[in-house]
Image: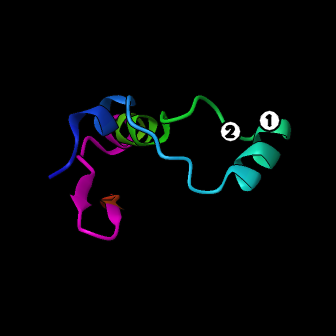
Amino acid sequence: MISYDMIIGGSHILRNPTIYNLLYKMGMVTDLGSGVRRIITLVRSHSQKEVLLQETANEFILTIPRP
């Protein structure tokens, strides 16, 4: 079951702090935990479709629909 917090951007697990810090210093990342929310918003606005969110015991899968 997908956490509602993940969809609204309130859930975040920093999996690789070294990579995050490097990308942050380069200005290539934004707020922590905002990626899924931004993807959902952009896909809706560009394709009027919904992303598919799935969570298993070992992974989180976000499927972006084709146009």
Count the numbered circles shown. 2
Q: Position of residue 27 (x, y in %)?
A: 79, 35
Q: Amino acid at mark 1?
A: Gly
Task: Identify the residue shown where x is 38% and y is 29%.
Answer: 10
* Front-lying residue, 64 or 12: 12
Give the image location of residue 3, x and y in percent.
22, 42
Judging depth in this view, the residue of 23 and 12 nearest the camera is 12
Q: Amino acid at mark 2?
A: Val
Position of residue 60 measured from the top left corner of the image (x, y, whole percent):
34, 61
Residue 59, picture quadrant: bottom left
The image quadrant that residue 8 belongs to is top left
Image coords of residue 31 (percent x, y): 59, 28
Quadrant housing residue 11: top left
Label 2: element kind: loop
Identify which residue is drawn at 74% across, 41% down. 28
Q: How is the image coloured?
A: rainbow
Q: Which of the labelled discs sits on residue 29, or is there none?
A: 2
Q: Which mark is residue 46?
A: none
- Direction from residue 35 to residue 57 in the image, left or right: left
- Secondary element under disc 1, as helix, strand or loop, is loop
Q: Are marks 2 and 1 in contact (CB under 8 Å)?
A: yes
- In the image, 54: left or right of 58? left
Magenta stretch, residue numbers: 43-61
Question: Does the rendering let one see residue 38?
Answer: yes
Q: Say the numbered circle drawn on residue 27.
A: 1
Camera-side residue of 65 and 59: 59
Label 1 CA crowd tier, 10 Å (few <14, some 14–19, many 20+): few
Q: Is residue 66 visible?
A: no
What residue appears at the point 48 percent right and 46 percent down from the top-left corner? 13
Question: Residue at coordinates 34% horizontally, 58% vertically from top-left?
Answer: 62
23 sits left or right of 44 in the view? right
Report whether 15 appears left or right of 45: right
